[in-house]
Every structure is written in structure tokens, then in C-alpha cells.
Amino acid sequence: MINGIRRIGIYGGTFSPPHKGHVEAARAFMKQMRLDYLYVIPTAIPPHKQLDNTVDARHRLRMCELAFADVEGVIVSDTEIRRGGVSYTVDTLRELSAPDARLFLLCGTDMLLTLDKWREAEEIFRLCYPIYVRRENDPIVSARILSKISEYTERYNAVVRRVLVEPIEISSTEIRRRLASGERVDGFLPSAVEDYIRRNRLYGAE
């Protein structure tokens, strides 16, 4: 807490499944933004991507609880799952906003580049500070990011910052593919998450 203001992070996503890249991003986010605590919030139904409907939201919530169990200050929240329907970021920001709170929203590259297309984008920028993290080192993408940040600053008076973390080339899509095809996922998942997936035979894993 700084000057009586709670610094609250928000990290949403499908987390299907949550992997080590997610965990490392959360650790860096908390440290570099000096957060008091961080809400990890699995979506109910994401508005911007197809979700693997074979994995129930409650499984994704439980996997998040296992994945982030050792990260001090993380609160895994079922707020969007309880709300049901399509999960809109602006609704979650409204729910968590308070006079004594400053909200920081963690974005991946794709999310940052399209944030102005999200529902009530102007309200999103009013309610939070977008903080982005990258998992790639493409100079073309770097130029697009800088251009977009300039646009957000001019259009919304936004303050956008970056979390610096060593890029971890892991995607949930690739992990699901490996699990379904019987390939190894060593080093990609927290061990408790992999055990949970195999016990419950999620994503076609045996």
C-alpha cells in the first residue's frame, strides 16, 4: 500500500491450462508493479477466443489454485465464473474498483494490441493501468506495440507500462496438443497441475 492506496493487480484469462509462463508473469507483475495482491481470474466464457468446451470452468479454477499456490499475494477468484455468461473485463474492473484502490491490468501482446476494440474500452482505460508482458522478441511486433501505446496515450490519456520478464515460449494451445497426442509436457506445467490433468483425464491426457 502506498499513501493509503491499495495496489491491486488483475490477471484474467482462460488458463486452459495454467502453465509456468503464467506463473512467472504473475511473479514479475507483482514485484515490478509493487502490488499488494493479485487477483487471478479464470474466465467463464471468453469473448475473444474459442474455449475448449471439454474442460469445465471449475477444472480451470482448480488448476489455477494449484498453479499459483506458492505465489504470495495471489488470490484466485471465481468472480467471472460465478457471474456466468461472456466474461467482459470492464465488468470485473467495475466490481473491483474502489476509492482506495488502484487497479493494474496485466495484458499479453495480443490483448494490448486490441484493447481499444474491447467492450467499453474508454471505461477500461479509465478504471485501470494496462500493464503488458511479452512472450516473444519480434521487432515488427515491438513497433506495433509502440505505435499502439502512443495511440492509447493520445486517445485515452492512458499510462501503459511493461513488465520485464524473460520470454517463456510456452502456449496453452501447444500444451493441449501435446497432452492429446501423448507427448511429454515436462517443464511446461507446475507438477501439481500436470498431476491434476492426468488424474482427471483432461485434454485427452492419459
Image (spheres, helix red, strand yellow):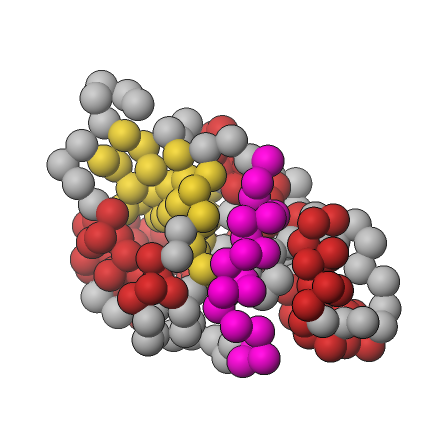
Which x, y percent locates residue 164?
A: 55, 37
Which x, y percent locates residue 56?
A: 52, 72
- The answer to whether residue 88 of the structure is visible from this angle is no
- The answer to whether residue 89 of the structure is visible from this angle is yes
Give the residue displayed 26% in from the left and 53% down from the top.
93
Residue range (magenta): 52-70
Instruction: Examine the structure image and report whether residue 58 is included in the region drawn in magenta.
Output: yes
- In the displayed image of the protein, which residue is found farthest to the front? 199
Front residue of 147/7: it is: 7
Determine which quarter of the picture holds residue 34. Answer: top left
Give the residue displayed 22% in from the left and 19% down from the top.
3
Front residue of 21/95: it is: 95
* Horizontal side of residue 38 vs 174, given as left or right: left
Whether residue 49 is situated above or below residue 5 in the rendered picture: below
Determine which quarter of the picture holds residue 70. Answer: top right
Give the residue displayed 85% in from the left and 72% down from the top.
182
Quadrant of the snapshot with the C terminus: bottom right
* Horizontal side of residue 51 vs 116, given as left or right: right
* Horizontal side of residue 184 vs 131, given as left or right: right
Instruction: Examine the structure image and report whether residue 158 is included in the region drawn in magenta.
Output: no
Which x, y percent locates residue 107?
A: 44, 53
Whether residue 97 is situated above or below residue 115 in the rendered picture: above
